[in-house]
Amino acid sequence: MDKKEVLFQKLSDAVLEMETENTVMYAEEVIENGIDAFEAIDKGLSNGMNRAGQLFEEEEYFVPELLMCSDAMYAGLGILKPHIKLSTSADRFKVVIGVIKGDTHDIGKNLVKLMLETSDFDVIDLGRDVPPADFVRRAKEESASIICISTLMTTTMDGMSEVIHILNTENIRNQFKVMVGGGPISQNFCDKIGADGYSVNAADAVRLAKKLAGAEAALK
């Protein structure tokens, strides 16, 4: 591996192993070596957090470990985020994003938000524990193009389908693209509730959002 890939691996491992000081050190090395900060977040910090999430699903990690991993990740973000080049495009697609009602896990949502913001999207963050109706209301108020809904809990997944139901009931489903994501979500669930797309991680979410935004732009 070249130096860049080695640093990304070290960042990922530091997050996974809950090593905050090392995460900061490697993030600073990224900047010192002129390596792209966005790529370091994607392939380093985000990758490490995804690995931690996998261990959580396998019950090798529990909530305390996941929180310590997130502390390390956020410490790295504090170093890298100021070095990301934000888009200055005036014609940015609006995205409403949030964690569905009943769930307060927002690490994944925050990563997606950050990466969307650095990829030509104007992001309205509703936070966590968001009622289905609030996604629809804010999307209408903001004239958003995309609604992004996440959850880490199987018990709250039905709230995602409720958002789709509200859009259909109000006859405005065709006005918004709906993206879903989170640990228990699958492509099969996405298709079942009638969402427009599903992503397994933050980087895929950005690619999907660009694809959906491009499809919408082609219709205008």
Image: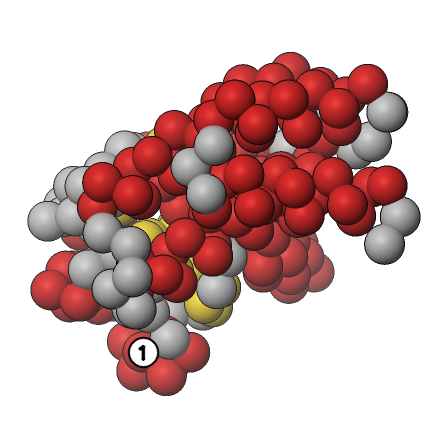
Q: Position of residue 145 (x, y in %)?
A: 49, 48
Residue 183, image quadrant: bottom left
Which residue type carries mark 1? Phe
Looking at the image, which is closer to me, 113 or 196?
A: 113
The residue to which callout 1 is attached is: 189
**Scheme of colours in the image:** secondary structure
> Residue at 14% across / 60% down in the picture?
156
Can residue 72 be seen from the camera position used here? yes
Q: How many labels does the image show?
A: 1
Q: In this view, does 80 lie above or below 176?
A: above
> Image quadrant for the C terminus?
bottom right
Q: Is residue 31 above or below residue 43?
A: above
Q: In the rendered view, does 66 fall on the left or right side of 31?
A: left
- Judge the density around disc 1: few (<14), some (14-19), many (≥20) Cα neighbours within 10 Å: some
When asked about the image quadrant of residue 97, the answer is top left
Residue at 42%, 78% in the rendered image: 187
Q: In this view, does 64 lie to the left or right of 95?
A: left
Give the residue drawn at x 67%, y 28%. 26
In this rendered view, identify the residue nearer to me: 187 or 39.
39
Residue at point 70% right, 20% down?
28
Query: Could you tell me if residue 120 is visible in this image?
Result: no
Decide which of 115, 73 is in the foreground and name it.
73
Residue nearer the viewer, 177 or 70: 70
Give the x, y percent position of residue 138: 29, 37
Q: In this view, does 170 lie to the left or right of 188?
A: left
Q: Mark 1: which secondary structure?
A: helix
Where residue 200 appears, x then y in whole percent?
48, 64
Residue 124 position within the rendered picture, expressed as x and y whole percent measured from the top left:
40, 31
